[in-house]
């Protein structure tokens, strides 16, 4: 059975010249979910409501600025150099997770200094709040009809008429399910029990890195880049490798220190 992409209007609604896009709305939903989840856990983490609101504010700046700059630098530098104002056209899509991650890490470092908490103590608190927001962003990609998958003969292949008539993997939905829902369940359950500092952050990096690396095998490489190594590796996979390595290092350090402290 072949499924036809529903061709969703990327504009949610319009008020005169003002257009509200689904893509931006999904980001707002994602931030709202992160705020709600964080508020549920804030008291246990000794974070006040005011600090929680500040954390979301810092996170929004990190995601938007880092995500957009990361996309431009990693995926579309020639277009930016030719048309610098394209940097601000966020509603057209074009946000890099890895750039957003760097932006959030910088924002978290500044936030941790402000409230006088350890950096990894804050990242361990943030990590379980992130996946559902990522999932919302992937739904935004799907509504935009971007980041489609490679051709497939599977029964759940989807035809994207604005691309071609081939059945393709709906890779945006795979990512929403894995990087969003599955990773959220893993981190939420893992972090419900006391864990050594850095363990939750490390598991986030390992979990996201693994899911992203695997989905890239069925996602169409960015047209302007294609495969960048070995005839099969995409930019997404290349950028994900340092995450996996960092995650393994953090998990190793977290539990080795835990063992040392227990002696």
Image: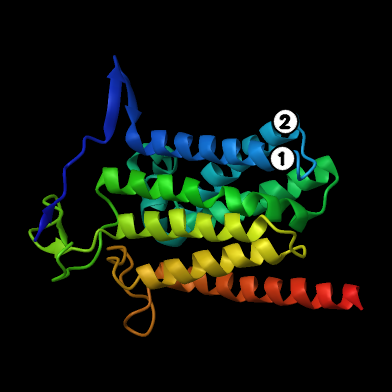
What residue is drawn where x is 35% and y is 46%?
A: 139
Residue 90 in percent (x, y) is at: 41, 40
- Whether residue 58 is visible, yes or no, is no
Q: Earlier in the sequence, mark 2 or mark 1?
A: 1
Q: Quadrant of residue 42?
A: top right
Structural crowding at the residue carrying mark 1, measured as other residues with C-alpha within 10 Å and reported as few (<14), some (14–19) or many (≥20): some
Whether residue 4 sits left or right of residue 248 in the image: it is: left
Badge 2: residue crowd in 10 Å (few <14, some 14–19, many ≥20) = few
Q: Residue at x 55, y 46 (%)?
A: 63
Residue that protrudes farthest toward the top in the picture: 16
User: Which image quarter: residue 21?
Assistant: top left
**Quarter of the rendering occupied by the N terminus:** bottom left
Q: Looking at the rendering, in which quadrant would you find the C terminus?
A: bottom right
* x, y percent for residue 215: 36, 68
Disc 2, SS: helix
- Residue 29 image position (x, y, % from top left): 46, 35
The answer to whether residue 205 shows anywhere in this view is yes
Secondary structure of the residue carrying numbered label 1? helix
Is residue 75 left or right of 41 when viewed as pictured? left
- Residue 242 x/y as whole percent: 57, 73
Q: CB under 8 Å between callouts 2 and 1?
A: yes
Look at mark 1 in the image and give the residue it sits on: 42
The residue sitting at the right extreme is 263
- Mark 2 sits on what residue? 49
In the image, residue 212 above or below residue 141: below
- How far apart are the alpha carbons under marks 2 and 1? 7 Å
Counting labels gives 2
Q: How is the image coloured?
A: rainbow
Name the residue at 52% across, 38% down. Answer: 33
Residue farthest along the bottom direction in this orientation: 230
């Amino acid at each position: 059975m072949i499924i036809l992409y529903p061709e969703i209007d990327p504009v949610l609604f319009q008020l005169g010249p003002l257009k509200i896009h689904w893509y931006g709305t999904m980001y707002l939903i994602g931030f709202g979910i992160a705020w709600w989840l964080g508020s549920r856990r804030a008291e246990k983490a000794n974070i006040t409501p005011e600090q929680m609101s500040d954390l979301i504010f810092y996170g929004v700046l990190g995601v938007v600025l880092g995500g957009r700059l990361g996309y431009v630098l990693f995926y579309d530098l020639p277009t930016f150099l030719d048309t610098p104002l394209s940097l601000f056209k966020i509603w057209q899509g074009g946000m890099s997770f890895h750039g957003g991650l760097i932006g959030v890490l910088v924002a978290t470092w500044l936030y941790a200094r402000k409230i006088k908490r350890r950096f990894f103590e804050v990242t361990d608190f943030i990590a379980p709040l992130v996946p559902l927001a990522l999932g919302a962003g992937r739904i935004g990609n799907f509504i935009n009809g971007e980041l489609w998958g490679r051709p497939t003969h599977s029964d759940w292949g989807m035809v994207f008429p604005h691309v071609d008539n081939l059945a393709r993997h709906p890779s945006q939905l795979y990512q929403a399910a894995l990087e969003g829902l599955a990773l959220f369940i893993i981190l939420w359950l893992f972090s419900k029990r006391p864990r050594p500092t850095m363990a939750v952050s490390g598991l986030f990096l390992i979990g996201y890195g693994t899911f992203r690396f695997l989905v890239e095998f069925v996602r169409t490489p960015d047209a302007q880049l294609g495969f960048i190594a070995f005839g099969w590796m995409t930019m997404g996979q290349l950028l994900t490798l340092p995450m996996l390595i960092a995650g393994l290092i953090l998990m190793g350090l977290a539990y080795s220190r835990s063992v040392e402290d227990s002696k």
